[in-house]
Amino acid sequence: MTTTVRHFLRDDDISPQEQAEILDRAAAIKSRPFSDRTLEGPQVVAVLFDKQTLRTQVSFAAAIAHLGGFPLVIDGKLAQVGVRESIADVARVLTREATAIVWRTYGQERIEEMAAHSSVPVVNALTDEFHPCQILADLLTIKEHKGRLAGLSFAYVGDGANNMSHSYLLGMAMSGLHVRIGTPATYQPHPSVLARARALAAETGGSVTIVEDPAEAVAGVDVVATDTWVSMGFEKEKESRQGSTSPFARYAVSAELMALAASDAIFLHCLPAYRGFEVDASVIDGPQSVVWDESENRLHAQKAVLSWLVEKSGGDRR
Ligand code: NVA
């Protein structure tokens, strides 16, 4: 019997049922952190970074170690994937020695190329277009604080064209949430992602709404989220995005904006956060913020997704 290798390159590489399964696995792993030994050996997981990292490196290294494996962290500046040698050749090399590949890089087409030449699972640890592991952590956090997912309302305000916006659209719609994106007309999500999110929402009973008015986006919602206005790789646009004429200024999550959400709403931020820009200190450091739980949940969610992918792909090397 041949098993098809499973990758997690974007949020909709898994079905709604599979997402629920992974989230249940994450909750179980969180309650018994060393119960899953999928990577025992220790088996190697290659973790490559072409962009800056803190949480992702720490949480993947800890996740792989907890699963009994060895995290082989590779600095993208040394490996120069796609420059020193082709992405395909890197995939061929890593596949022979690693049980899975985790990669943070620029264009989504790069990780797709890696996956196309890999016979082991490839996991997206952030690209310019998507950040699917973060959304699993966010869903786990919402479920812990709200007791459920389907039917809740969620608002993301800020850069509607970035990786977090795209992944929220897909991942939250997949869980049956009512997703609202509040963003300027010039930073709209990619139309194909929007269409896919709408199709998912139609399947799960969720919904997707894009608005320009941040107050309209957050009105009465259960969850408010934002992200930096200057994503990694977009540093050249720092002045136009974060300067005095920033189009995002009115999307900053101030205490006033947060007060428009439900009185028991929670606040999420994938971090790193820039207080005084996309969020005020009074919100991120205030009682409605659950960002430290969210950050820790990267660990549990990634353990779940790694062990699930390896299991589904029949990739255990022992
Ligand atoms: N949109 C941000 C997310 C950081 C985790 C970035 O890409 O830099």
Image: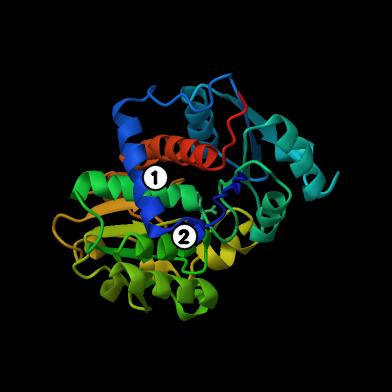
Secondary structure beneath dot 2 equals helix
What residue is drawn where x is 31% and y is 67%?
Answer: 204
| Mark 1 vs 2: CB contact within 8 A | no
Residue 77, picture quadrant:
top right
Closest to the observer: 243 or 38?
Answer: 38
Q: Residues within 10 Å of mark 2 (few under 14, many from 20)?
A: many
Instruction: Tell me the quadrant of the picture where the C terminus can be found.
Output: top right
Kindly tell me whether residue 207 is visible in this rendering: yes
In x, y percent, where is residue 91?
Answer: 74, 43
Name the residue rendered at 33%, 77% in the picture. 213
Coloring scheme of the render?
Answer: rainbow
Q: Percent from the top left, x then y, of residue 227?
A: 43, 56
Q: Amino acid at mark 2?
A: Ser
Badge 2 is on which residue?
Answer: 167
Which image quarter is the N terminus in?
Answer: top right
Image coordinates for residue 27, horizontal then vertical, percent: 31, 37
Q: CA distance from mark 1 to mark 2?
A: 16 Å
Q: Which residue is mark 1?
A: 22
Check the image and name the residue furthest to the front.
1
Looking at this view, is 35 or 273 the one in front?
A: 35
Q: Is residue 66 above or below residue 197?
A: above
Tell whether 195 sits left or right of 112.
left
Above or below 228: residue 141: above
Q: Secondary structure at mark 1?
A: helix
